[in-house]
Amino acid sequence: MVKEKKENIIDSNLQRKHKLRTKGVKVWYDDFMAIKGIDMNIKANKVTAFIGPSGCGKSTFLRLFNRMNDYVDGFRLEGEVTIDGENIYKKKVNVEQLRKQVGMVFQKPNPFPKSIFENVAYGLKIQGLKDKKFLQEKVERSLKRVALWDEVKDDLNKSALALSGGQQQRLCIARALAVEPSIILMDEPTSALDPLSTSKIEELIYELKKDYTIVIVTHNMQQASRVSDYTAFFYLGELIEYDKTKKLFTNPEKKQTENYITGRFG
Amino acid sequence: MTSLDQQKETLNQAGLEMLHLCSKQLDNAREAFFTHDSDLAEEVVHTENRVNALDLKIDRDCERFIALHNPVASDLRFVLALRKINFDLERVGDHAYGISKYIIELNTPIDEELLIKMRVHEMFDSALSMLEDITGAYDEVDTKKARKVFKKDKILNEINMDSFRIISEEVKKQPELINQFLITFSIIKKLERIGDLVTNIAEEIIFYREAEVLKHRKKKKINRSKE
């Protein structure tokens, strides 16, 4: 029997208006229906914020785009999730290649217990890239991209765990950028950071959207309104409202959205 | 009630207080003008301090509300609208003060016949009626009531437009009364401005409630679009 070859199906050179799309997406964790049928188009090179109360399904929905939910017991999906027009849940999809295209940053900075250099070069090394000069260039470029280079250039061999929380989070973003994704998913990336580090990450998000499509889950309403171009409000597994951020935060269509963003929910 | 709701209600009540205060100022100025009561006019002049103090308080409280509560959507529209309403009301208060100053300076009452010819009574009544409507509209957040003032403002505009012609004719007939004519003309101008300020307030109430910006739009279209 011939084993089916897994392919990298995403061609990010294609310029499409909508980078990410979902059609009739439903998600179950065993019997619990976490996502109840969502159609959504996410624009390329824009920042899209997902907001909603805890348990509304926003993180589950975010993790669909790099198939992070695959590891969760009892996870089941119905509907289509496409990136650049290709269904990423087709059997022949190479999930490692998919995750190279779709970087992720988590709530708590999670650097590896290795040096700063090794952290950023990690993704490239596991792809088999060994050329020292190439790796050095990539690491420098990624660290410069997240405005961390000047702070760490003389200590690249120092443990990443010695960095501050804000620096660690920027390092994690640099690590994600090193493998050249076209999409970055951020799951509450600043909830563990102080205001100054938060502001640096937000500036970075603003800078990065020129080259990346960014989706961010946040519980901070001001953050959503500051950094995003589009905002989606989720509640009980449904997409209640999805609009331009400037519209949603000044004149939302739905009463539920208004109650949530003004802090009167429930 | 959340802390934000409490603050919003406090601000709302301050706005209502400003509306009542400025309406009362104009009402007293009217009474003082027609009865030539300089004591009442003095009272209006003194009360202007209260108007200014309340104006400053509302401004400061709005600033704090924005800084401390980061309002969005209808809460943000509320506080933005209230700031402008407060500004407009302070100007209404200034005009009531200005009218009262004239009354104090006048040695003899203005000829009743001239006042009738210039429709000054009608103008005062319309301006006060507009203020009454807008107070109700603000208190009940009733945009239908707010829209009523656009029609009433037309009466003020019409009287104002006619006043120039009437004054020009009258001053030729009785040049010795030039001082009275000029004061009457100034008062008409002030009342016409009050009408404009009240329509601005109506626009702000509509902006708060319906998120619709009516500024610089033809009022005819505004009324028609809601019919």
Image (cartoon, coloured by chain):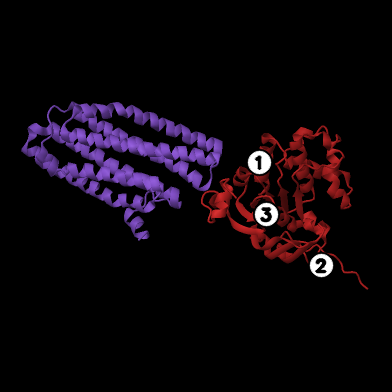
* Badge 1 and badge 2 in a common chain: yes
Callout in the foreground (3, 2): 3
Q: Which residue is drawn at 69% across and 41% down?
A: A201
Residue bearing the label numbered 3: A56
- The reply to whether the C-beta atoms of the residues labelled 1 and 2 are less than 8 Å apart is no
- Place of residue B9 in the rendered image (x, y in percent of width and height, measured from the top left): 47, 40
Compute the Cα span from label 3 to label 2. Answer: 28 Å
Residue type, numbered disc 1: Glu
- Say whether residue A244 is left or right of residue A201: left
What color was chain B assigned in the picture?
A: purple
Q: Residues within 10 Å of mark 3 (few under 14, many from 20)?
A: some
Residue type, numbered disc 3: Cys
Q: Residue A57 carries which label?
A: none
Which chain is home to disc 2? A
Q: Residue A91 carries which label?
A: 2
Residue bearing the label numbered 1: A203
* Badge 3 and badge 2 in a common chain: yes
Q: Which residue is drawn at 39% across and 37% down?
A: B86
Q: Which residue is drawn at 12% across and 33% down?
A: B178
- Place of residue A237 in the rendered image (x, y in percent of width and height, measured from the top left): 67, 58
